[in-house]
Amino acid sequence: MIVTLTHIDVIRIASFLNSDAREVLKYVAFYQIIGEGGQKLITPPIITTRGIAYLGLLKLSDGSCIFLSKNKCSIYPARPTACRNFPFTFQVKNGWLYQGISIRAKEYCKGLGKGDEISEKKLAKKGTKTIKELKEYEELVSKWNSLALKGQISPTPQLFIEYVLSRGFLDLSLLPLK
């Protein structure tokens, strides 16, 4: 399972770890997905120098998250939106916010059905915030991909992270091609 990231996640993690783009690259990966697996991801694909990829947290060789330590998240206050929302999923259809439970929730979430119940109002607020974040990220990636397709940038992973950390204010079109 890939823990996908948005621009807000990258900014939050970089801030929490006091890291620059080069340092952030030690914790994230650009996953290339063969076949139709990418259609299941909610974040848009990014054009990179190695092809189309999805931004996510790096996994260790055993498949666990790079930030999982002693069965706890070592960046819990800065954890990605996907982790904050799990096991809930959100999408908009015909202008309506729909929420659900991840298909793999029972496999990954041993606490499912235990603990306090989340209110409908709180869940709707969380969903609205998530959808807004995803739309912003889609716009940022769309701008990036457009510049990459036009050959106006060399779409390296480090440049993408720099672009994200600048909150999209880095004018990529002014950079020389490498």
Image: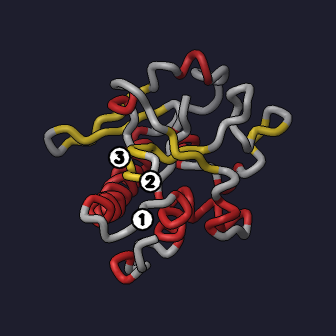
Residue 151 falls left or right of residue 29:
left
- Cα distance between the residues tagged 1 and 3: 19 Å
Pick the front one: 38 or 130? 38
The image shows residue 35 at horizontal and vertical percentages of 36, 24
- Cα distance between the residues tagged 3 and 2: 16 Å
Q: Which residue is mark 3?
A: 44
Q: Which residue reaches farthest top?
A: 107
- Cα distance between the residues tagged 2 and 1: 7 Å
- Residue 154 shows which numbered tag? 1
> Is residue 122 visible from the viewing direction of this image?
no
The image shows residue 169 at horizontal and vertical percentages of 41, 79
Residue 162 falls left or right of residue 44:
right
Tag 2 and tag 1, C-beta contact below 8 Å: yes
Label 1 or label 3, whichever lies nearer to me, is 1
The image shows residue 171 at horizontal and vertical percentages of 38, 80
Q: Is residue 101 above or below residue 18?
A: above
Q: Amino acid at mark 3?
A: Pro
Q: Earlier in the sequence, mark 1 or mark 3?
A: 3
Q: Is residue 175 above or below residue 104?
A: below
Secondary-structure class at tag 3: loop
Q: Residue at x 68, y 28 (%)?
A: 63
Badge 1, how many Cα within 10 Å: few under 14, some, many 20+? some
Q: Which residue reaches farthest bottom?
A: 174
Q: Quadrant of the N terminus?
A: top right
Secondary-structure class at tag 2: loop
Q: Earlier in the sequence, mark 2 or mark 1?
A: 2
- Residue 49 shows which numbered tag? 2
Pick the front one: 108 or 43? 43
Q: Residue at x 45, y 43 (%)?
A: 54
The image shows residue 121 at horizontal and vertical percentages of 40, 45
